[in-house]
Amino acid sequence: MIRRLLRFSTGTKLIDWMTWDWTPAVSFLVALDTGSDLFWLPCDCSKCVRGLKTSDNQMIEFNIYSLNSSNTSSKVPCSSALCEQQKQCSSPQSNCPYEVLYLSNGTSSTGVLVEDVLHLTTDEDKTKAVEAKITFGCGQTQTGSFLNGAAPNGLFGLGMDNVSVPSILANENLASNSFSMCFGPDGVGRITFGDRGSSDQGETPFNLRQSHPTYNVSITQVNVGGNTADLDFNAIFDSGTSFTYLNDPAYTLISENFNNLAIEKRHTSNSSGLPFEYCYDLSANQTNFKYPIVNLTMKGGDYFFVNDPIIVISLQGGDVYCLGIVKSDNVNIIGQNFMTGYRIVFDRERMVLGWKASDCYDIEASNTLPVNPPTAVPPAIAVNPEATSGNANNTNISGASPSITSPSRHLKTLFYALTFALIPFFALI
């Protein structure tokens, strides 16, 4: 298995970041995204993000990829099987262009496809690098939210298309066609290429579309505070989205049951502009509180227990905690907050999603990135993912605990300045 260690935004788990090294060695902070396919970097660009400030006002300068600075790089010709815009080429030998448009705020990335060598380490010999030649986007022009904090130094697509890095590694027989991402409760995370999980993990099959397959799964039941509802709907597991987005009836069912069991007073201020509908006031110096559990039953019968359904936000009038679900008008998305505390396996050979509880320290570290990204902007998701809904039939599980005590780690506050843009992006293909 090939692995690299990544670190999420500490405490808030807003966005995934990762470093990759080229020849000569250059590192990039990229957003990891299972909701899109293409890996692109800002490249020979005139208008791109050059750096960011951390929470302690430290400035991190970004590297900008340049074809002229890498002695292992080359442009991809239009004759390549990975060139999806051959109709825009003047000849088979022309440089292959790419363009990814996103539905959110005029956001896009355009440029040309290039090849370069990615250096990875293996479980067998961590002193020896595996050199993987991959195809990615030389992002010459970024627009919209990519200039305001969403994937400011590149987007690492992990989808099922042939151009994604997991697909390239599998096609080159460098790793099994599977990978895992671990989302630790303290903000640490890991990605491992070739990881097919374990025999004792929970599993559910992917719902595949022939035109553009995604990591779409079926949920058959929801449980909030011990109250179970039979509810069939589909959702995409998307690491590039910070929080969970649900449409009705799932959104209303979960949020209203949560609200009925919440102990703290509901936050009623309309001036705070929070993206979350169900928030609750915390008293000064409050170190713990109780909130209703939220659990899911997946197709096939395995349970997915949500460890971190809430987010604590610091406002001028004091702290509040919110149910970390945003109402969606279309697609259902299981975001990063619902994946916290799990090693999520995206098995593209068996076409199943796997999960197992983990603190992400049970895998030996190979690299660490202690960086706190400053925004809560989710990068991207595949185009037109289908997510259907069903009708609910409420029942009750006898003996189920209606609430649990929240430990103090939930009081790692997310300052409201970080929540200004929580709209997921959808790529137009």
Image (cartoon, rainbow, N blue to C red):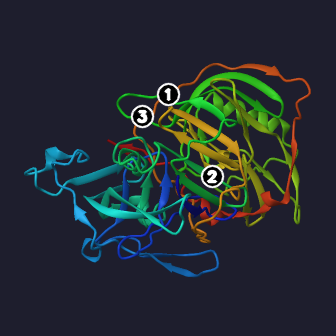
Badge 1 amino acid:
Asn
> What secondary structure is found at the residue carrying circle 2?
strand
Residue drawn at the location 64% of the way across and 47% of the way down: 343
Badge 2 amino acid:
Cys
Residue at image mark 3: 213
Badge 3 amino acid:
Pro
Which mark is first along the chain, 1 or 3? 1
Quadrant of the image occupied by residue 189: bottom right
Dot 1: few (<14), some (14–19), or many (≥20) neighbours within 10 Å? Answer: some
Dot 2: few (<14), some (14–19), or many (≥20) neighbours within 10 Å? Answer: many
* Residue projecting furthest to the front: 124
Assess whether mark 1 and mark 3 are in contact (beta carbons under 8 angstroms): no
Residue at image mark 1: 207
- Decide: is 297 above or below 155: above
* Residue projecting furthest to the bottom: 58
Residue 208 location, x and y as percent?
45, 29
* Residue projecting furthest to the right: 399
Residue at image mark 2: 182
Judged by depth in the image, the label closer to the viewer, 2 or 1, is 2
